[in-house]
Image (cartoon, grey):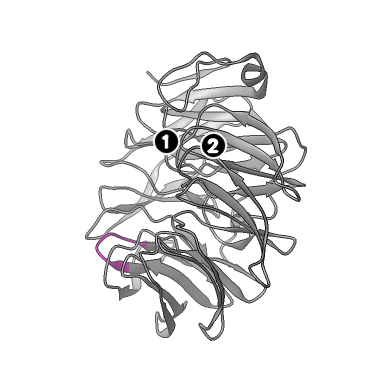
Amino acid sequence: MKSALSVGIVGGVGVSWATAEETERQRWAFETDNAVASSPTVVDDTVVVGSGDSTLYALDTATGETQWTFDTEGYIFSSPTVADGTVFVGSDDATLYALDAETGTEQWTAETGGSIGSSPTVAGDTVYVGSNDTTLYALDAATGETRWTVETGDYVTSSPTVADGTVFVGSNDATIYALDAASGEQQWTFETAGKIESSPTIADGTVFVGGWESFYAIDADTGEQQWTHDASVVSSPTVADGTVFVTTAGGLIYALSASTGDQQWAFETKSSLHSSPTVVGETVVFASLRNVYALDAATGAQQWVFASGGRSSPTVVDGTVFVGSDDTSVYALRAGVDGSSEGSRVRLGTLGHHGARRVE
């Protein structure tokens, strides 16, 4: 059953009745047929998100009603990117899809040799995406034709980030790669102590990225380490006003100084964190496997919690939080603050973003 619900039963583990506060917070919920690990992308009046039921959904932001759907042959963990009227998304069927953003009609497909959990990034007229065939692909955004590929030593589930003509991406071979965006030529590599599933965020000349053994700040030009923080990180960090917000597999979210790595505060949940945080105004929003949280960005004090979570990363648009859940639903929640995500990968990369990108 796939439907938009104005009020629903929610629960991060099992099923529980919604509290009055949660009922008031929820604008709508859309039910799919499997867990929603993909992170929603919001463009104009449409939220686009994939589901483990192998379907990509385009939903009305105000009501959650379906505008169109597109079926693939595999779980959609990849988060969609929208550029110049085209939706790009990967699937576990080893295919990258380019779809018309208004109708969902297929424009082209590009096959790889492995499942695609990486989220595509569009820069200029090129789309970049990783595959579990150990390869990073650079494809023509208009046709899907391959421009170059770079092979790593393991799965590339990390989503690439492009800044100043350089592609930054992690690999499960415990290496972070900096590659020339036009040619794929290697500029530098940085070896870490564990797998890199986190997607890099670039801010003020620094690459922020997490690994299974540590969190790193790396000079974007040279690949030299600036500082590290002891944490197991599979999500992607967010940078806002000189602070790095990063969630950990151990159930903690940290606020760290972007320049020094010094801890400003930490907030402990009771569940592993795979969701990337997003910042709107003075609020940071993220999800655990059980709940969606809103915290004061300056102090870490809890503002509210909603009892449904998962691996999807939230984005906030015009005061509404859009996020997927392991309970098979996509939620639209009242953020409790006006505005849209600003200090996040909305501006600094990919994953859980809003606003269409323009191919130039």
Q: Main secondary structure of the magenta part?
A: loop
Is residue 236 or residue 39 the one in the foreground? 236
Kindly identify the residue that appears in the image at 76 percent across and 37 percent down: 337
Q: Quadrant of residue 254?
A: bottom right
Residue 82 belongs to the span the image colors magenta: no
Secondary structure beneath label 2: strand
Kindly identify the residue that appears in the image at 39 percent across and 36 percent down: 51
Q: Which residue is mark 1?
A: 36
Q: Quadrant of the C terminus?
A: bottom right
Q: Is residue 135 left or right of residue 165?
A: left
Q: Is residue 202 left or right of residue 157?
A: right
Q: Which residue is mark 2?
A: 323
Measured from the top left, where is residue 319 in percent x and y?
A: 72, 36
Q: Is residue 17 above or below residue 105?
A: above
Kindly identify the residue that appears in the image at 24 percent across and 57 percent down: 114
Magenta highlight range: 130-135
Instruction: Bin the neighbour count of mark 2 within 10 Å (Cα to Cα): few under 14, some 14-19, many 20 and up.
Output: many
Measured from the top left, where is residue 217 in percent x and y?
A: 56, 72
Residue 68 visible, this orientation? yes
Q: Is residue 350 above or below residue 273?
A: below
Amino acid type at circle 2 is: Val
Secondary structure beneath label 1: loop
Is residue 158 or residue 242 the one in the foreground? 242
Q: Is residue 217 above or below residue 335?
A: below
Measured from the top left, where is residue 239 in percent x and y?
A: 65, 60
Measured from the top left, where is residue 175 in percent x and y?
A: 38, 73
